[in-house]
Image (spheres, helix red, strand yellow):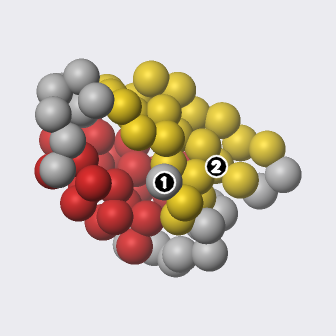
Amino acid sequence: MNLRGLKCPLPALRVKKMLSSLKSGDRIIAECTDPLAALDIPNLLRQTGDTLEGQDKADGLLTFRIVKK
C-alpha cells in the first residue's frame, strides 16, 4: 500500500480503512514518508488489536508489515 507523500493523519486513516476490508490473517505492507506515521500507525494497531509484524526505516521511507487480527 503506497502512502508516500501523505501527511498525518492520512496514512493511519488509509491503513484503518484497508484493515476494515480484510479478513483475519490477511497481511498488508504500508509504505509511508510522513515521520509521524512511526507513531500513528503503531498506536492505531494497539487500538484495533491488529499485529505489527515489523517496521523498518530506510532513506526516509517507513515500511510497516501488518497482520489483520
Q: Residue 14 appears at what percent x and percent y?
A: 34, 64
- Is residue 53 rendered to the left or right of residue 60? left
Q: What residue is rendered at 48% in x and 54% in y?
A: 1
Q: What residue is rendered at 45% in x and 73% in y?
A: 8
Residue 27 bears which disc, if any?
none
Image quadrant in which the C terminus is located? top left
Which amino acid type corresponds to the residue marked 2 in the rendered image? Leu
Q: Residue furthest right?
A: 59
Choose top left, top right, bottom left or bottom right for residue 49: top left
Residue behind mark 2: 62
Vertical relation: 65 (above or below) 10? above
Q: Secondary structure at mark 2?
A: strand
Q: Residue 7 appears at what percent x and percent y?
A: 52, 77
Q: Nearer the viewer, mark 1 or mark 2?
A: 1
Whether residue 49 appears in this view of the structure is no
Question: Considering only order in the chain, which callout, 2 or 1, is on the residue closer to the N terminus?
Answer: 1
- Is residue 15 rendered to the left or right of residue 32? left
- Is residue 17 rendered to the left or right of residue 63? left
Foreground of the two, 4 or 35: 4
Q: What residue is rendered at 49% in x and 41% in y?
A: 29
Vertical relation: 4 (above or below) 29? below
Vertical relation: 11 (above or below) 58? below
Which amino acid type corresponds to the residue marked 1 in the rendered image? Met
Marks 1 and 2, how far apart at CA:
12 Å
Residue behind mark 1: 1
Q: Residue 2 appears at what percent x and percent y?
A: 55, 60
